Image (spheres, rainbow, N blue to C red):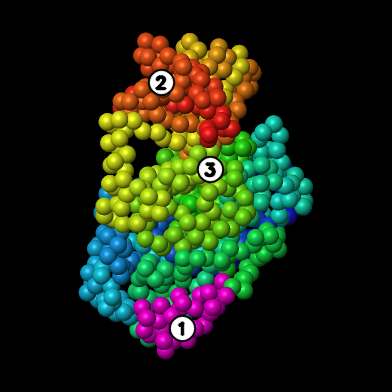
Amino acid sequence: MTTRPERQDDLPRRASVLVIGGGVIGCSVAYHLARAGVPDVVLLERRQITSGTTWHAAGLVGQLRTSINMTELARYTSELYLRLEAETGQATGYRRCGSISIATTGERLEELRRSASMAKVFGLEVNVFTPADIAARVPLLHTEDVLGGIHIPSDGYANAVDVTNALARGARSAGARIFEHLPVTAIRTAGGSATGVTTERGDIDADCVVLCTGMWTRALAASVGVNVPLHACEHYYALFESVAGLDSNFPVVRDYDACTYYKHDAGRLLVGAFEPEARPWGMDGIPEDFSFDEIAGSFEHFEPVLQQAMVRFPALESAGLSTFFCGPESFTPDVRYHLGQAPELDNCFVAAGLNSIGLQSAGGIGRVITEWIRRGHPPSDLWEVDVRRNHPFQRNRKYLGERVSESLGLLYATHFPYRQYDTARGVRRSPLHDRLRAIGACHGELAGWERPNWYAPEPGQARYEYSYGRQNWFEHSAAEHNAVRGRVGLFDLSSFAKFRFQGADAARVLNHVCANDVDVRPGRIVYTQWLNDRGGIEADLTVTRLAEDDFLIVTAAATEVRDFDWLRRHVPADARCVLTNVTSAMGVISIMGPNARELLQSLTPDDLSHEAFPFANSREIELGYAVVRASRITYVGELGWELYIPTEFTPGD
């Protein structure tokens, strides 16, 4: 069924919160806002409820995620679906049949056992199964190569269309208004804030706009300067009918080593996959008229999955293949969805890029977005999905197309510690990158930066060999540790995020934001935190006073966007100061260890003695042909300096 349409002549001219997108995410956001008592909630859907990608969701509802907060959100979703039908009168098709994840390699078995331990800490019931346990629970399954697995009794599945309509019905009953067949043609802005939208039938003013537009979100957000890096990929599944021995108690089965999942679907067996090399879709944009549509896909691409499925479930060889389906799903560069307030535009929130876990995430997302909007801050630590973790370059379509072809498959890949991405590498490079690589640096990627994680004795040995055991780089890293502890070592820290904060009111504003006193004499370094109004830590960084009205702020590469946004939001409108991101303007070399002074002193005529250059001080020195900023600070427990060098001087000769 579809939800009852609103009268088109009742289109409001104002909303407190305007939700764009009528998939399961948008309807959950509207439901939770309305149920929380937020007045004048309006949802606009360009076509029809569920018509984007929700309608073809496989319907899995799992709960175990990679952190306790993400698990709590997934568990809340499961509990919501359990009561939603009784609450709204709309069937949801929700069934708690349990899930079984199997392992056919030792590494996968280790991962599942670790997951089971983690689940118990999170308060989630989980059972470690032997091959015999699995065979007894799923007689149809070929288990000769299975080493073990885990069973989560409270997992299950639901009908995504029915769940979405139930959420829409619940939202309407609580006062929200939902309009279908009404595309948003533009987001309206003024003074750096979202102020409403333009539709084919006129403008609607809003105090807050929430983008729940799925695979259309990147383009819509970009139209107002908001960065939401995601890209559509082809996602496949097949339906087999007349599967001998299949019954309604069949649990969801995940065979991660074969990249496949299986679920009961109205008397049929659904076989889906997250293959290692996915096929991006919509490189030239997502058609505006795409509605309840399939895409052609490639049977040849999916055929290896079907062949493995017939090995795992021999009964499929004699069953009938009733449906071969390919539809688009949006994926993100790090396989984590995008949630929260956009740093580029006030009063604009994002909930998109669900990486095929939209149904099992929708309830939790609706709840936390509602609390975020009402309170002005997230209800818990949601950094791993916070939209502020993204960097501007990540909206590049070439980058996205290459990265999501890998990230889709990472959902079911073995999650080894220290695993690195293979695609879209070399995006941001230090001026020293090539020289360090030539002497054996093994680079890892963070926020697009290629950073030396460790050094091999020979350049040809600089590669990761993934394992749950002792890492292949352990001895190399230990040698580096001992060198810094006993002698001296150099670190390339050019990826540090660096901001200049300048103006007559800069000291006053920073002292309000910082936990420590930064109103110190020029040349002093202050290590400090930025706190929120609940006493929580928002940032951990250093502030160096360069002059009476000039400060250098240095923070982590991963939090560059978040920290810049935090300070920007806390600068009073009448303050006389300017915040500038100068990350790319300088490289950073850290010299650390007992012999740091001896090494650096041999390269500069300036006095580096303790009396002349005490700890937590910063000043310019001559180095080679350059003038660089030397900051005496350390994070390794030994004597050290950080050298801030103009980018063009960083490579030296």
For disc 3, the marked residue is: 429
- Residue 476: x and y, percent? 31, 45
Magenta residues span 298-326
Q: Nearer the viewer, mark 3 or mark 1?
A: 3
Q: Mark 3: give few (<14), some (14-19) or many (20+) Cα within 10 Å.
A: some
Q: Residue at x 63, y 54 (%)?
A: 397
Circle number at residue 601: 2
Q: Residue 44 colored magenta?
A: no
527 or 351, nearer to the observer = 527
Does residue 159 appear anywhere in the picture? no
- The residue type indicated by label 1 comes to Glu
Is 407 left or right of 609, judged from the image as shown? right
Give the answer, above or below, for where 16 lies relative to 594: below
Q: Secondary structure at mark 1?
A: strand
The answer to whether mark 1 and mark 2 are in CB contact below 8 A is: no
Question: Magenta includes 325?
Answer: yes
For mark 1, what is the residue? 241
